Image (cartoon, rainbow, N blue to C red):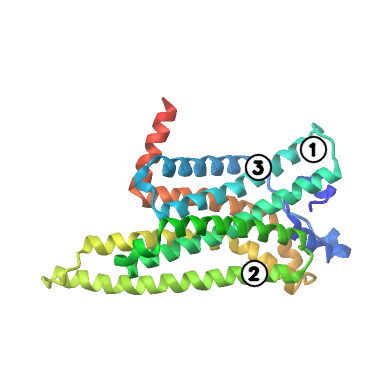
Amino acid sequence: MTPLSTLQSGINITNITLQSTAEVKANESTIIHIEVPKGVFLFLCLLSLLENILVVVAIAKNHNLHSPMYYFICCLAASDMLVSISNLVETLILILLSYAVIEYNEPMVKMMDNIVDTMILCSLVTSLSFLGAIAVDRYVTIFYALRYHNIITQRRVVSAIIGIWVASIACSITFIVFSNSHVVILCLIGFFIFMLVLMLGLYIHMFVLARKHSQIIMAQQKGVRRGFSPHQAAAKLRGAITLTMLLGIFFLCWGPFFLHLTLIVSCPKHPFCREYFKYFNITFVLMIFNSIIDPIIYAFRSRELRKTLKDIVMCCSQ
């Protein structure tokens, strides 16, 4: 929970940071937190929220986008919205407190901080889970194309989506309640590593196939016919490339957060760790950047989604 001193200074941190700084309380005066202007948080949160709302509306509006992959992308956009909303709410509370528009009430602030932290962690778990679901969907599309509709059924997709959201909310609440336990933090780090290994394994296998496809295309260009068109090869792997980009951006933006968790468990009192803790607020900016960049990747890689987004923007501007 965010302490009063942190709220008054306008520094946006979560329960997890408190646990690390509490262990080095004696040296707290030597730690200078890096403050990110609240105006920057507000602008980035609003931009991210608007972008992801547009993605959700576009997928809901266009029936051509009603497929398992885009359902998962829609959920990923909703997950990104949690980061934007949580930071937006917390930043607005900080602004209202700093201008004495509302009075400081410790129970209320603690409750709001726990809600915000739960939303951020829920976004993290759901984002990882839906990236994994999309990777599995692309894998089945490429390697089991003829059986795809038998494997990825509407019922299984809906069950997976509901299961991921319910499990993520439960895990996030558990993490906040037991945030002083290193076991819980290790479980979150373990989940991150497991999903990383799983998705890397799937993508490596997919891109090994991409190399084989390129060899087939080269053979066709030389006049050898093997019943496999270059267009089909490109179409099959386009979705995998898109999701590889999403995966890379996710780990770049959320990696510092997991490094922070690792340092909390391994060396909270080490001078290097205390120095790294100064920059925790920067990780929030990176999280928001992730939710800003994701919709841009969707639109850039999907002509159908890009067209629908353009139609929505044109309609709203009239």
The disc placed on residue 88 is 3
Which residue bears the numbered disc 2?
189
The amino acid beneath tag 2 is Ile
| Identity of the residue drawn at 84% across and 45% down | 107
Percent across and percent down for residue 249 are: 50, 59
Whole-number angstrom distance, CA of label 2 to CA of label 1: 34 Å
SS of the residue under disc 3: helix
Q: Is residue 218 above or below residue 40?
A: below
Q: Nearer the viewer, residue 197 or 270?
A: 197
Q: Is residue 143 above or below residue 280?
A: below
Residue 102, position as x, y percentages in the image? 81, 34
Q: Residue 66 vs residue 233: left or right?
A: right
Nearest the eye: 256 or 70: 70
Lower sequence index among marks 2 and 1: 1
Q: What is the spatial separation of the Cα atoms under label 2 and label 3, in whole angstroms?
A: 26 Å
Q: Relative to the observer, which residue lies in front, 158 or 138?
A: 158
Dot 2 alpha-carbon crowd within 10 angstroms: few under 14, some 14 to 19, many 20 or more? some
Label 3 crowd bin: few (<14), some (14–19), many (20+), radius 10 Å: many
Q: Which corner quadrant holds the C terminus?
A: top left
Which kind of residue does numbered mark 3 sit on? Answer: Leu
Helix, strand or loop at label 1? It is helix
Q: Whole-percent x and y of residue 17?
A: 75, 59
Residue 97: mark in rendering: 1
**Camera-nearest label, 2 or 1:** 2
- The residue under the point 66% across, 46% down is 87
